[in-house]
Amino acid sequence: MVSDVIVVGIDIVRSEPPEYAVAILEDGEEVLKKRLSKRELFDLILSLKPDVVAVDDVYELLDGASEFLELVKSHPELKLVQVTGKPGDQRSLQRLAREHGLPTPDPRNPEEEALTCARLAELGVGVEAFVLEDETRVRIGRLRRPGQGGYSQSRYARNLHAAVKRATRELQRLLEAEGMEYDLRVRKAEGGYASAEFTVYERYDRVKPVVNKVDAREIKIDVEPVLRDRITFRDTSHRRELLTIGVDPGTTTALAVLNADGEVVHLESSRELSFSELTERIESLGRPAVVATDVTPVPQAVRRLARSLGARLYVPDRRLSVDEKRELVKGHLARRDQNIRPRDTHQRDALAAAVKAYHAIVKPALRKVERKASEEIKRRDVLRAASYVIKGLPVVDALRIVEEERQVERERREEREKIHRYRERIASLKKELRAYEKKVKKYEHEIEHLERLVERLKRENEELKEKLDRMRDRMEELVEEKIGRKLEAKEREIERLRRELIREKSRRERLERELRRAERLNAILRSGKGIPVVEVEKASHEALAGLETPPVFVLYVEDPSGMSESNVRELSDLSPEAVIVPEDASIPEHALEEFRRLDLPLLREGEDVTVKRAGTLALVESDELRRAVRRTRKRWEEREREREKERILRCIEEYQRRRRGKFIR
């Protein structure tokens, strides 16, 4: 995309009161996503001045064309795009997102849909909505009305009228210098003009800078764009190129449209065809190159139409007779084998003007380009180059411009593809990051648990030390009190306390060993060289249903004696690395067969693998587990081969028995 392009995507949240989800892209990067009221949304657009406002339905944003006037007056270059297509031919955001490789938005999430609107508009998807005519009204008047009074008041009024007239003349000069056509109505007054109204046949954004040059210190100048009677839509992709337009204006307006090959693609006449409808009809058919009429002098409406469409105006050198028009139309249709007949004289005149313009301007320009163009150039590019030739460019320059446009389009397409690949990579990395964050969070919880365990063991150790100190103190007191007849009893008491002390020392040493062991196991877990062991008493449905397990773990079943095939399948659904049972545990044969069928390694503690424990924490070393799993699977494979061998031997014995029985008979 071109740098510094700002796209605002909008989706309605609720209609009463109006609230919208807004997503803003700047150079393809998401910079804002929030919800706003309608007033806040319009204020944002006015302050931000985006290049494009993208919606899935224009009428969710605007109640009518007049509501867009506030935005257009402040930001004339603003483009309003309906990404879902023209009304009546719309497609869902979800379908469009899938077609263009974007994440599919959740219909219940307005923020996601707003972001998708912005992304689609950024890729050039959708139709542009037009609310303004290529016409602007400029009103020049007095700042205030002079009141009643004597000579001084009359002189003040004359000065105001003269100022309005000077501003009118100055604006006329500026418009003519810019080559802008206009109509002017004035209301004369003593000394000049009371007011003046211009109808300028140009867009608001072109007229406004010209009007700003007029000295308006003593007068008031209002500039207003002319609104269309309804919102219209134009799809700029895949449109016909190099159309020739024939128009017969009047009470009944007729329209004839020829394509680049001279074929009639549209012919109609109507008393109710307004200027905006006529423009919309032509724009929906393609890009016009020439607008032609046989009416002289050329009506202002035809000039305005050609200027609005950016097309060249063509008028025959002389007025054609009725017979000439009839023969011209008849011969043209016969040569193209088109079974079309004008229904009235208006259609005939419009078609005759279009045919005359096609042969006088379009066809020669097309032939010039075809002679100069290379064989590799596409037909669409030939037509585009011919449109530049019709506007007055040399053939070489026209072909060069078309080639530059093709190159720009290729670069934009490559850049869009590159952006799409980057987005896919970013989405993948974000997914991986979330998975790692989840793992880290899990390990942090385990570390916190182990740290709490260590703290508890430390507290118990301190308590035991204190208790030991008290016992020592008590023993010393008893030794000092050994006298007389109580000496033997005291000695027995001392001996008992000594034994108790030894037991407490042993217990403390055992707890310290358990603490050190827990710290070592914690270090193994942190290093990734150990796999946590989740222990259950039995492999019953009730024990497994609510079992919480880490992503990578080994399951330890203390009593597998009543294990069924369905229990084994439930174990397999938990996805443990292996299942460990006590070394002397008894397991039903059908359960063993189910372990082998599901390829779920079954290991025995002590015989296959060593389970290291510290308090409630238990783990197995990763390398030892992998070796044990390989040995188990190898045993299963050998046992399967033995079974297969026995089955084959039984088949052979059965066959031999049958053969012997046959010979005996």
Image: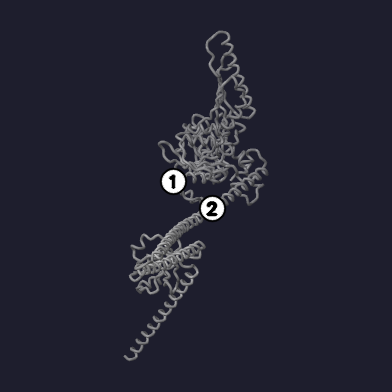
Mark 1 closeness class: few <14, some 14–19, many ≥20 residues within 10 Å = few
The residue pinned by badge 2 equals 426
Name, please, the residue furthest toward the front. Answer: 484
Count how many numbered circles sit on residues in the image: 2
User: x, y percentage for residue 561?
Assistant: 34, 71
The answer to whether residue 346 of the structure is visible from this angle is: no
The residue singled out by tag 1 in the image is: 109
Which residue is at the front of the view, 346 or 10? 10
Mark 1 and mark 2 residues within 8 Å of each other at the beta carbon? no
Left or right? Give the position of 519 relative to 586. right
Question: Label 1 sits on what residue type?
Answer: Asn
Q: Residue furthest top?
A: 150
Residue appearing at x 34%, y 64% in the figure:
541
Q: Residue 508, percent across and down?
A: 43, 65
Camera sees residue 385: yes
Q: Determine the residue located farthest toward the left in the rendered image.
A: 665
